[in-house]
Amino acid sequence: MTSAFSIFLAGASRGVGRAIAQLTAQQLKVKALLRKETTAAELEAMGIRVVLGDALNVDDVERAILADEPIHTVISTLGGLPNETNRPDYPGNKNLIDAAVKAGVQKFILVSSIGTGNSVGALSPQALAALGAVLVEKDKAEQYLINSGLTYTIIRPGGLKSEPATGNGVLTEDPRVVGSIHRADVAQLVVRCLNSELANNKVLSAIDKNQLFGKPEFVEFRLD
């Protein structure tokens, strides 16, 4: 990665977004949008510039993305918690995508979920019943990004775990594959996609090759 890269990260307060922040902060210029100040000090200590604002507010998003130096890549891991009523999965990502188009960013990486779009068949009926409403919103965000004209990479992780990275995270274009993956491994795959032109305009599922559900044969997607 080149130090000239400037990325904008939405979702850095927790989960995959926080793991991406930890991986990129030392090598890249990172600006993160935070809704609450709770984790601001920790991110700033990593060298990340924090902008307070809500992804659901168009003005906040435009102010964050369009101000100052040009942003090369926007990375979004936005997703609401199960108990939230105003989830940002679609509306927040729509605001980010619109601002990215206005700003002329080079690339937009969206972390979505297995079960959206053509991967709907990978999930069990029980999982679909539990996640259905969330997956609909994530699918809308995916489609909006695909139709935006931006160069994109969509990464759909399987079931997420918060344990340390295993190094066994892989990507595939096969929408039938499902399994678990650690958040830290998803973050590693996202960072690898930053500099990979092979990942441009691709929709990829992310799983740990040792944590597959069933034993499907699939082709691993290579980033280099």
Image (spheres, rainbow, N blue to C red):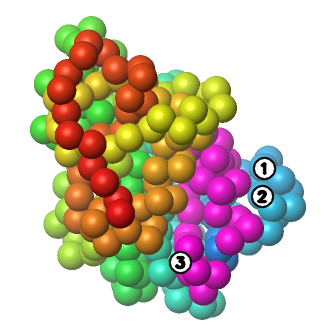
- Residue highlighted by disc 2: 43
Task: Identify the amino acid type marked 3.
Answer: Ile
Rendered residue at 29%/25% (across/down)? 178
Which label is found at residue 39? 1
Q: Which quadrant of the structure image shows residue 32?
A: bottom right
The Cα atoms of the two marked residues, 1 and 2, are separated by 6 Å
Q: Give the range drawn in magenta.
A: 1-27
User: Residue 130, percent across and down?
Assistant: 33, 16
> Callout 3: helix, strand or loop?
helix
Task: Identify the amino acid type marked 2.
Answer: Leu
Q: In this view, does 160 lie above or below 130?
A: below
Question: Would residue 41 be found to the left or right of residue 65 on screen?
Answer: right
Question: Does 220 appear in magenta?
Answer: no
> Callout 2: helix, strand or loop?
helix
- Residue highlighted by disc 3: 65
Question: Does 13 appear in magenta?
Answer: yes
Rendered residue at 65%/42% (across/down)? 14
Contact check, label 3 and label 2, Cβ < 8 Å: no
Q: Is residue 168 above or below residue 102?
A: above
| Circle 1 or circle 2, nearest the eye | 2
